[in-house]
Every structure is written in structure tokens, then in C-alpha cells.
Amino acid sequence: METLTDITGNFTQHYLPKCALVFYETDTEEKQCYVEYYDMDATGQPRNAHPLSVLETERLHACLETQARAKQAFLKPDGLLSQNVLHIDPSGGSVMWYTKARIRPMFFIPKLGIPNGKAHTPALLWKASREGVALYGLSSDRVPNINTPLYHAPFFNIYKGGRVCMGTVDVAIKSSASLEEFIEAWENCFFNSYFSHLLDSYNPVKGNCVSLWKRLIQSGDAFPKSELVRNKMTLKNLLP
């Protein structure tokens, strides 16, 4: 049996209060400002109030500059744009890409009666932002175009419209993630999570979903495209 790796730490950052600024302004016609700096203790309570110093101002500037650079770096490719990337929406912070049919690790809760292992999966279309990911099936490995018909992704834990239910997994993507890191993080998160149940009271394949994946895990056969179910959408429906 394959060993699962806990990747939650790759997605989660914890922020603790370190200081606070209070801006005061006079109620006179000629407005004047005064900034007071507070340290924060271990319980998050302000203490040691004092006027904002030059050194503290420089630290604040450095912090804001770092955040601005990180925002600019989000979804920026490390090199040439990968051929599997179909669309990037910088303003909405989303990416659409496709993956060809391949062997993937698959993990299932014991209640399903499907052994964990590796199985062939079909070509897939992904659309993700920091907040979530939607997944769709494709009938071939050819590069999709705007008229390419989409199919239901043949997996558990996916709503009928394609949105993936990640359960209790924390998938907050780093604000400085490059395009490659962003794509890899979502694919790893999806296939390293346990499949548990069907959603929206619908079956994403033509046959029995449990029987299908049990057979594919045990046999190593290629994913049967005849099991894919059309969902009435084309790639064009996913564009902003």
C-alpha cells in the first residue's frame, strides 16, 4: 500500500498579530496626523504605545513592498508558458489547463471497498483559482479548443457542475505561487485526497462508479472512454 503524504502544510500559512498602528487626526480645518505604534503580546493584546519611529516606518515599507512583489509574481510562469495551459485570468486569479490521460495515485475511504493504488485516468480539463477548482473529463488527449465538448469528471467528491468538494482540506494557495506551482499544487491536492462519496445525487459515469474504479485499480486497464458522460458544456462556457 502506498504511503500518503500530508501536504496540508504546503498550502497553509498562520498569521499572528505582531503590532498595530492607530492613526489620529485633528478636528481642525487644517488636518494634522499622528501615528501611534503598539506592540502585541502573546494573547494579541496591544501594549507599549509610542509614536511611530523611523525604523518602524522602514519595516512597514519593506513589508508592503514585499507583498506588492508577491502579488505581481502570482501566476507568473517560471519560463516559457507550458503547452497545457489554455487560459490565464490575472484579474480573477484563475487558470485553465488540461492534462492528458495518465496513471494517477488513487485513495478511497474504506467504506467504498475500493483498494488504494494507481489507475489510468482520462484526459482532464481543470479550472482553478485560490478558492477552489473545477474538473471536467475530455474524450481525447488532443489540445482542447473553445468548441471542445466537456464530460463529467468520472470521480467521487465532485458536484454536477464540476466544482470539486475538498472537504476539510485547507487549500489556501500561496499569494506568491508561480503558474507552475499553482497547477502542481491543485493536481497534487486533488489526487492525494481521499475519494469518499458521490454528490448532487448523480452518477458521473455510465456504469457503477464504485465497480469501475475497483476494476481499474485491480486490472491496470486504460480508462474506458465509453464510461464518460456529456455535461452539455463546451470549453467556451468556462471562459470569463
Image (cartoon, rainbow, N blue to C red):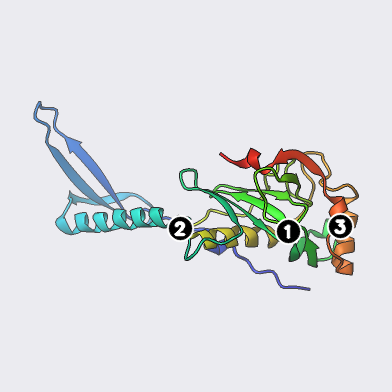
Residue 76, label in figure: 2
Do the CB atoms of the residues marked 3 and 1 lie less than 8 Å apart? no
> Tag 2's secondary structure?
loop
Residue occupying the point 59% across, 60% down: 83
Residue 89, label in figure: none
Dot 3 or dot 1: first in sequence order is 1
Question: Which three-letter amino acid code belongs to the residue tagged 1?
Answer: Asp
- Which residue bears the numbered disc 3? 224
- Which residue bears the numbered disc 1? 141
- With 55 as the anchor, is 184 left or right in this view? right
* Quarter of the figure with the N terminus: bottom right
Residue 70 at what x, y percent from top left? 39, 57
- With 113 as the anchor, is 12 left or right in this view? left
Label 2 neighbour load within 10 Å: few <14, some 14-19, many 20+: some
Question: Which three-letter amino acid code belongs to the residue tagged 3?
Answer: Pro
Residue occupying the point 49% across, 64% down: 80
Tell me the distance, in whole angstroms, between the alpha carbons under discs 3 and 1.
14 Å
Tell me the distance, in whole angstroms, between the alpha carbons under discs 2 and 1.
26 Å
Circle nearer the viewer, 2 or 1: 1
Label 3 neighbour load within 10 Å: few <14, some 14-19, many 20+: few
